[in-house]
Image (tube, rainbow, N blue to C red):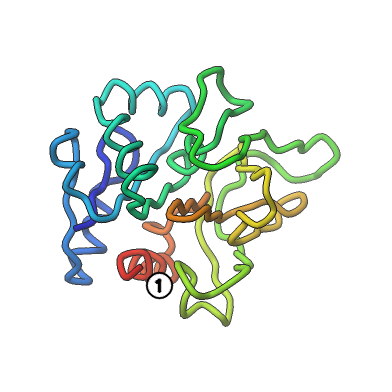
Amino acid sequence: MIALVDYGLGNIQAFANIYNRLNIPVTIAATAEVLARAEKVILPGVGAFDWAMTRLINSGMRETLDDLVLRQNRPVLGICVGMQIMAARSDEGELPGLGWIEADVRRFDMSNSGQQLPHMGWNDVAATEFEDIFRGMEGGSRFYFLHSYYFAPRRPQDVLGQTDYNGGFASAVRCGNVFGVQFHPEKSHRWGVQLLKNFAEL
């Protein structure tokens, strides 16, 4: 069973709708008791880093998440801010992140660019391999983005996909059972559906 972590951030129902159409069992976890039964976890998120961390801590699910991910090695997929809070820290806030991946979250430096923030709309993702969440996308993939901060892994081997916006940044990462994507698969049509299906089949 895939659990969608409901801590008040992210379009939970959009993910549930996709999995329901795929006939893949999914549950919405708003309590530690429900979350503890998860075989896989999706951690969505929108908004600011500190706000997301505060909401997660106040939900009472932080310890259960750490247990599932760090001790039981259940696959987890962080999305947008849900990915960013997997890092150690962020330029956007003061609270420490979950620290599941050795990474920092940084603000795009657009001072010498004609481009604007936020990075919003469709963009290409160049995957580094096609065995896991990017399976079946060897011909290329495009996803929908909306963010002003980016995930910066400290280890190059944790980068799973890259995107160009005033230079390249890690738009997808993996460290063991921990996956993260900066884009919104629930808004990315066939590529997003394929990615969510691939995660369910890990």
- What residue appears at the point 59 percent right and 25 percent down from the top-left corner? 92
User: Vertically, is 135 above or below 40?
Assistant: below
Is 180 left or right of 119, judged from the image as shown?
left
Quarter of the view holding residue 104:
top right
Picture coordinates of residue 63 (x, y %)?
A: 30, 30
The residue sitting at the right extreme is 112
Q: Nearer the viewer, residue 50 or 21?
A: 50
Q: Residue furthest top?
A: 94
Residue, far front: 71
Q: Residue at x 54, y 36 (%)?
A: 87
Look at mark 1 in the image and give the residue it sits on.
190
Quadrant where the C terminus sits is: bottom left
Q: How many marks?
A: 1
The quadrant in which the N terminus is found is bottom left
Q: Residue at x 48, y 28 (%)?
A: 48
Local packing at callout 1 (Cα closer than 10 Å; few below 14, some 14-19, many 20+) is some
- Residue 25, quarter of the rendered image: bottom left
The vertical placement of 112 against 79, above or below, is above
- Residue 117 x %, y %: 65, 39
| Place of residue 2 in the rendered image (x, y in percent of width and height, measured from the top left) | 23, 56
Residue visible at 28% across and 55% down? 40
Residue 109 versus residue 172 in the image, above or below: above
**Which amino acid type is shown beneath numbered disc 1?**
Arg
Instruction: Label 1, secondary structure: give it.
Output: helix
Which residue occupies the foreground of this view, 122 or 23?
23
